[in-house]
Structure formats: C-alpha cells, structure tokens
Amino acid sequence: MIRIIEPRFSEEEKEAILRVLESQQITRGEFTKRFQEEFAHYLGVEYVFTVCSGTVALFIALKAIGVEGQRVVVPALSFMATIDAVYLAGGIPVVVDVDDYYTMDVQQLEDAVKKYRPKVVIPVHLYGQMADMESIMFLSEKYGFYVLEDAAQAHGASFKGKKAGAWGHIAAFSFYASKNVPMGEGGAVVTNDSNLAREVRKWIDFGDHPAFNVRITEFQAAIGTVQLKHLDERNRRRREIARKYASALDINGHLIHPSEREGAYHVFHLYTLRHPMRDKIIEVLKEREIDARVYYPYLLSELRKAEHLPLPRAERFKRELFSIPVHPYLTDREVDYIVESLASVVACV
C-alpha cells in the first residue's frame, strides 16, 4: 500500500535520541529550549511555547485571550480539534463557510463579525494552504477581534512572504505524527504579543490559577529539532509532486485540483482533489494499493451542532473532497503509478 502519510526518521534522529538518554535529562532540557528558539527564528516570531498537542495549543491560546462566554468564529472545514478547543475553553463557536481554497470565506466572516461580535476568529490553514490573512487582519483592525491562526497543517507555508503563525495575534501548531514536522505528539503556541505570552506561560508553568502539565518530553523535542532542519527541503518535494499531479491529471472538468492562492506558498500537507464520484474513486484506488482518504467527512457545524451562517460551498465540498499521497518520501515511480491509476479510474466513473 502506498501510504497517504508516512513520517520517516534517520540516523540523525537516532543520534539525537541517544543524546537525550545519555544526558539523563528527559524533560525541560537542551532540545526543548533549542527547538523553541529555532522554531521562533524560522517563523519570525518572538515567543514559542511547546505543548503536548495541537488541540492543547488551541485551548491554551484561547484561555490566554479569555473567551469564556464569548463568540469565536471558525470555518466549516477543519479537523474537530478546532471547534472542540473553543468549547473546552468556554467559548461559543460560530461557523462560517469556506472559499474555493478551502479556507475561511472572508466575505462571510465580515457578515458573522457584524452579527455576532466575536472576541476571536480562528482561520484554519487547511491542507497546507494559508487563509487570506491580509484581509482577515484588516477586518481584525476594523472590528477589534483577536486572530488565532490554526496552523496545525501549515508548517512552512507563507502568504505574501510572511510565514503561517506570524500573521495573527497568536497561533497554534501541531506536531502529530502526520504533520510536516512530526514528533509523534506535540504542539506549540506562538505569538509576538508579550501580554499573551505571559498568559500562555501561566497555563504551562502553573501560574496563579489551576493549570495542567502540558509539556513535551526531550525525546519529542529532539525529533522535532532534526525534522525542522529538513522542513523546507521536504516541502519543496511536496510541491514538486503536487505540480506533477496537476499537470498530469488534467483529465476533465470533473476532477478539481487544489489551487494556490495568489501570493501564497502552499506546503501540501495533503493533496486534496474534488470529484462527484469521490467514494467510488477511493474504493478503486485502495484496490490498487493506493491509500486515499476523506479529510474531513463532516462540517464543524453539524459535528458539534454549532450556530452557523449558510454553508453552500462547504456542504458541496464535503461530498466531493478526497486526498491522495503527497508525502516527500514518494518515489517518482510511485507518483507515476498514482497518476496512471487515478487517470484510469476517473475516466471510467
């Protein structure tokens, strides 16, 4: 089976893990500090706090802002953690539609802001594509809400030269095993705001209120430090595979490829296509030993029964979206096989 996601590790990671074992400091050590510093430099932000998951990163960012009883706007398409973190932090989610790039619809966002006056908006950089952060930050200035970037799938992505995580007031990353920087588990809260950083620290280092132990271990940080070194190179390979798919799979108007927003650098955490016969295509691809999946088979509004505006695009996309392998370890031969198989399947459905 050609796997849709395949994290790989080398002698570098093994050596880093051995250094942790030899140091006998398996938490709060050299690698945790180093990863936080190097990730901050990479993103161009002042503060990075590693935590145990992307969901926890979102939760802590929301608690740092203070959303108890406040509205928080999220897009209809995302992993459930985006809306779950809002509920867990005491917020009231409002769901808006997505645009043709599968990220938050900015026009509908403004309608939602006028109607609900949210304290926070969470744009999700879905599948490795950044939301229209320039427009969202303009609305933030105009209406006075916080922007929390959900960058769980966007390590290394950028928009108009600025990295995902560096646009909003605060951002959350995931380092789950499937991510472009995999640690197995893990996450990070990042910000340039010293006041928010102070509040975040209280939720990690046991401040003046009840908190959790949400730290990562030195083993995770060691793996992440090595993976971060190779992130740009591996993202370039993802983009190379994506270009090949886009050029080789120009079959007919029914198979819709992901498009890159003008000014954006898409890092293709997932290569997500659309087709009205999606389920049949997935079935046949799996018979041919190609892993294909649906990310995601639900809308956040229906998953958690949240308030929402009309969601015509997201409703349609939910029925048609599916993803094929795009990880950087695919061989050219495997890519060719995926192209040939998908072309023949789509031609017959």
Image: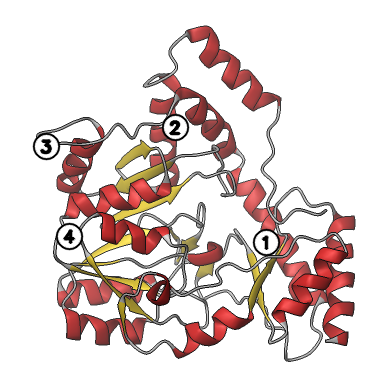
Mark 1 vs 4: CB contact within 8 A:
no
Quarter of the image for residue 305 reads: bottom left
Q: Which residue is mark 3?
A: 209
Mark toward the viewer: 3 or 2: 3
Specify whether 292 is left or right of 231: right
Q: Which residue is mark 4?
A: 67
Mark 3 vs 4: CB contact within 8 A:
no
SS under mark 4:
loop
Q: Which residue is mark 2?
A: 35
* Label 1, label 4: how far apart the Cα atoms are: 37 Å
Mark toward the viewer: 1 or 4: 4
Q: Earlier in the sequence, mark 2 or mark 4?
A: 2
Q: Is residue 133 above or below residue 220?
A: below
Q: Is residue 167 visible?
A: no
The disc labelled 3 sits on which kind of residue? His
The disc labelled 2 sits on which kind of residue? Phe
Q: Residue 11's x, y, as percent?
A: 70, 24
SS under mark 1:
helix
* Label 2, label 1: how far apart the Cα atoms are: 25 Å
Q: Residue 339's x, y, as percent?
A: 84, 70
